[in-house]
Image (cartoon, helix red, strand yellow):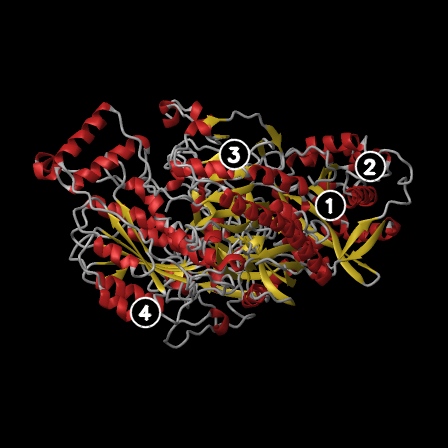
Amino acid sequence: MAVPARTCGASRPDPARTALRWPSRGSRLGPGARRPAAGPPRPLALLLPPLLLLPLLAAPGASAYSFPQQHTMQHWARRLEQEIDGVMRIFGGVQQLREIYKDNRNLFEVQENEPQKLVEKVAGDIESLLDRKVQALKRLADAAETFQKAHRWQDNIKEEDIVYYDAKADAELDDPESEDVERGSKASTLRLDFVEDSNFKNKVNYSYTAVQIPTDIYKGSTVILNELNWTEALENVFMENRRQDPTLLWQVFGSATGVTRYYPATPWRAPKKIDLYDVRRRPWYIQGASSPKDMVIIVDVSGSVSGLTLKLMKTSVCEMLDTLSDDDYVNVASFNEKAQPVSCFTHLVQANVRNKKVFKEAVQGMVAKGTTGYKAGFEYAFDQLQNPNITRANCNKMIMMFTDGGEDRVQDVFEKYNWPNRTVRVFTFSVGQHNYDVTPLQWMACTNKGYYFEIPSIGAIRINTQEYLDVLGRPMVLAGKEAKQVQWTNVYEDALGLGMVVTGTLPVFNLTQDGPGEKKNQLILGVMGIDVALNDIKRLTPNYTLGANGYIFAIDLNGYVLLHPNLKPQVSQTTNFREPVTLDFLDAELEDENKEEIRRSMIDGNKGHKQIRTLVKSLDERYIDEVTRNYTWVPIRSTNYSLGLVLPPYSTFYLQANLSDQILQVKLPISKLKDFEFLLPSSFESEGHVFIAPREYCKDLNASDNNTEFLKNFIELMEKVTPDSKQCNNFLLHNLILDTGITQQLVERVWRDQDLNTYSLLAVFATTDGGITRVFPNKAAEDWTENPEPFNASFYRRSLDNHGYVFKPPQQDALLRPLELENDTVGILVSTAVELSLGGRTLRPAVVGVKLDLEAWAEKFKVLASNRTHQDQPQKCGPNSHCEMDCEVNNEDLLCVLIDDGGFLVLSNQNHQWDQVGRFFSEVDANLMLALYNNSFYTRKESYDYQAACAPLPPGNLGAAPRGIFVPTIADFLNLAWWTSAAAWSLFQQLLYGLIYHSWFQADPAEAEGNPEVRESSCVMKQTQYYFGSVNASYNAIIDCGNCSRLFHAQRLINTNLLFVVAEKPLCSQCEAGRLLQKETHCPADGPEQCELVQRPRYRRGPHICFDYNATEDTSDCGRGASFPPSLGVLVSLQLLLLLGLPPRPQPQVHAHPSRRL
């Protein structure tokens, strides 16, 4: 679903609104018609008399006929209305079904949904569920700190000393190119047996934990082996947690070293390409490891930055952006003599997915030129951080500078902006291989509470762009228990296949001392996390008592939905699980001022209730309805979430079956209950075909997408289950049995004795809240394509929201072939809700309707919109008489159509248009549809779907070289100086890493992590729907186009969603106006222009506590490095290694620290 559109790219005038004009000189004006004075065109509705416009106009090619007068067309409209109403009264059976419900009043009770009580109960249940996870988290975090404090660091630890289950071992053994297979792993890796567990949607082993180590981290390093050693003790705590709460899902410890230990053990879901998963880049780890951030990234683009170095910087910035979450704010600028933002963002913006995508694309356009000017870069960054007029995190403030080196320390800038308080941390990154003195870069970082990093090659990027989190974690560690607060994440896709989850996180601190009597350790050990599947939270919400259009939703402090029926991300883990699912409440629904107010109140943690008129999009996303909804909301205590309930007024009450008067006291199978026989296929020939909603009636019921098979499974189970069985949902089961009997009585009283062919009907049907869809006769079920779950059927939900008869033509795509009109199988659905009033309580428990035979009703439509009765012959007009055209005799000159409220063709008097029924009318007659829109018969609603998945655009012609790799010229190879340069050294390192990490420079990390055959990524689709405007009266107008002008008449049909339109057929094609589009389109700019949206940020709140300062923080550890002057001997040796295919194992730079590295 989506938000009201602002713009998609640059805004421009709407050509659709300018097409109608007064008739030109060649137009056929009627007697007495006057031209307006010269001036700008005005809407025809204000200028033309509504009832007397053009009463007698000659028709093209038929001098004896005139365009029908308004009262004639109104007469036709009344005949159409009466015919539709008559058929629905006879066959729909609305009144008869009301009587059936009243006759069976003893079989059900009317229950009430009390919004405030209901939402408070659900909020309390969710709070209890999450609180159990919080207790497990705290036990884990406390245990981890205790175990690590008691652990004795071992400098001489060896791989064979450690026994653990390597989650990627099976995949590596299956891969002959795996490095561990080639090297022969020394670690004692366990081989485990696994059992399938439906809760985890995976095979698991409850006796062990599993370990995942990122590909770019050496498993045999001393730091990693010590980490594996002390975290092994967590295994027992994981198991004890599960014993206390069997509903626990993944329990995970993400270490700051990159090691992930999770329980229960399961093999890693290894992708077909390089596995780039690193726990430190997961949304839940980032949120738990530090407080929110205000970050400015400045990139040196002076001329000294060589081609490869600049590419390293671009990749580094993109990797840095991936360490930010939606609680953070960021901006990126490049600098040489001057500083300027790389994108259209002129200030800090929220680090959400769409804004980061803008940055990443903009960074690729950076070009190196000019001279280095650190002062310009830092002044720009400090100005950004000190801007008081923008929304920001107001917590950790930092500047990240990427450069190839320089001499200037810009001390005067720091003295002016940052000293003595040093509220802004400065992190410096020396990128590429060079001979520059790095002392100034170290000094900048060390004197501003930051850290200095070196990125000599592509392999160092991921590690060094995330290590800054350790520095930010220092104030949290020093704050101790005050910082030990559980946070709950946004929704995201679980890497191990659980689907959508939220994670509770708790930081784990290093409690060791640096030495006897010395300062407290400042290092964060990692983050503990426990997953909660969204499905487990959904199970706490009422499903079927709220009706088809009622629902529960929940949002977080960012306004992102945690629960919502429209939360349906299309990008799965197989494509790119790195992207969090961040759907704003105002994007999940159609935005308006009332919803903005509700959203703000929920974010602020308030309670509230509000009834509003709002727009809703149909389930098939073709229609818009204006409806009344009641919103009720409360906060979920002890969390960052708020819960809301949306209820239509007609869903205040619902039916609950009470079958106690039947055989509930008798311990017989449910199949012996009265009315159950009408679910059996043997009854379908006489009673009509029954589809049952695929609901979870009983725990042992086998689900199936095939409704016939599901019904068979259901019947077989009912032969064994008694009515009071504990394994079944009695509410669902009994309501299903009740509605089976109710709809069978409708067959008996109404349908069975009627001849459907007499009225050109293909089928009649009834659908109920209880989950029954009965289609009569049985053979009509062969062509029934509606969803068997009424709550997921668009016609059902729309019928409840609309009074009168709702027409639904078969859905067609303009790109697909037309309908096949064979054997009278194409039908038009007409449905209406059954409203009951029982003891002053109103509810709508069912929808009934008919399916019209398209061809037969198209012929009937011609007759009803003609100047004859059913008994008369078609009117004939002699050469000396004057007659009005009608839709039957004059179908060569007169176009007559019925269009529904979404602008889709329902019926036409043009035989060649019958196969276009169901298409958007602009695809049938663009000129006429534009006129209807311009005259306010239709209103347009544009919105954006932020959950779509799109195939990648075809790559540009970049030549044969891999993307992003610096390719030296022939002149470079012939130049001895080039071979001794830093460029050659960097290239060798690039190639060295490339032998192992095949596609480090791939632009899209999803390709490395996902299935290469399914490379869809998230994108934004623009949606356009049309719905009836403000015009209700009969209306005549002219489509002015000189000699190609056309007359038309339009009128709404009472008690339906139809518009009756009569128009002259176009004389020529010279008046082709702009075509209205309804089909969903890809928005190349990723939706509404981000540069405009960030100027109007939506209301949000960040975490209420910030840890960015502690007076006892020791900032002396601020990074170190040394320039490496390349020598010809070393380079030649490396080249020989490359040629021999014996690359040395790359290892990350490690500090031999008794706790872990930095």
For marks 2 and 3, give the one nearer the viewer: 3
For marks 4 and 3, give the one nearer the viewer: 4
Callout 4: helix, strand or loop?
loop
Give the image location of residue 176, x and y in percent: 39, 22
Give the mark, 4 or 3, whose residue is nearer the N terminus.
3
Residue 382 placement: quadrant: bottom left
Check whether the beta carbons of the residues at disc 3 and disc 1 lie within 8 A of each other.
Answer: no
Question: Which numbered disc covers residue 563?
Answer: none
Callout 2: helix, strand or loop?
helix
Give the image location of residue 505, x and y in percent: 53, 50
Check whether the beta carbons of the residues at disc 4 and disc 3 lie within 8 A of each other.
Answer: no
Distance Cα–Cα, label 2 vs label 4: 82 Å
Q: Which residue is mark 4?
A: 420
For marks 1 and 2, give the one nearer the viewer: 2
Callout 3: helix, strand or loop?
strand
- Answer with left or right where residue 385 lies relative to residue 756: left
Q: Which residue is mark 1?
A: 766
Distance Cα–Cα, label 4 vs label 3: 47 Å
Give the mark, 3 or 1, whose residue is nearer the N terminus.
3
Give the image location of residue 355, x and y in percent: 39, 56
For marks 1 and 4, give the one nearer the viewer: 4
Distance Cα–Cα, label 1 vs label 4: 77 Å
Few, some or many residues within 10 Å of mark 1 (<14, 14–19, 20+): many
- Answer with left or right where residue 957 lies relative to residue 1066: left
- Amino acid of disc 2: Phe
Callout 1: helix, strand or loop?
strand
Is 739 or 319 nearer to us in this picture? 319
Q: Which residue is mark 3?
A: 210
Give the image location of residue 310, x and y in percent: 23, 48
